[in-house]
Image: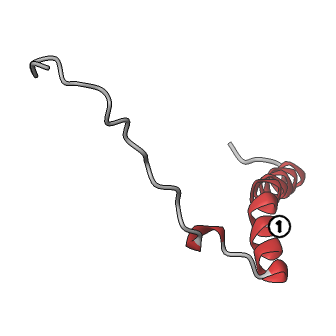
Amino acid sequence: MKTDPKTQKSILRNALLSVFIYLLPILLMFGSFYITGKRPWKQQQGTLSINKTINPINKKP
């Protein structure tokens, strides 16, 4: 069964629009990184502090 050319065109248009809407936030994010010069992936991550006052269960005081 062959689909109508008008339907094929509508499906293609809707698919391209969906891909554009999906990629738009990603493109805007990288555009803002380019304009501002910020690189969040290069920032120093906070160090994990371990509470040293907790005694293990098997350790006697």
Query: Which residue is pictured at 52% across the width and 60% down the height?
Result: 45
| Residue appearing at x 85%, y 56% in the figure | 17
Tally the marks: 1
The answer to which of 22 and 29 lies nearer the viewer is 29
In the picture shown, does residue 14 fall above or below 33? above
Place of residue 7 in the rendered image (x, y in percent of width and height, measured from the top left): 85, 48
Residue 42 to residue 52: above or below: below
The residue that mark 1 highlights is: 28
In terms of depth relative to the viewer, which is nearer, 28 or 46? Answer: 46
Q: Position of residue 41 (x, y in %)?
A: 58, 68
Splitting the image into 4 quarters, where does residue 26 fall?
bottom right
Q: Residues within 10 Å of mark 1 (few under 14, many from 20)?
A: few
Secondary element under disc 1, as helix, strand or loop, is helix
Colour convention: secondary structure
- Locate residue 27, reporting x and y percent: 77, 68
User: Is 52 located above or below residue 20 in the figure?
Assistant: above
Q: Nearer the viewer, residue 24 or 11?
A: 24
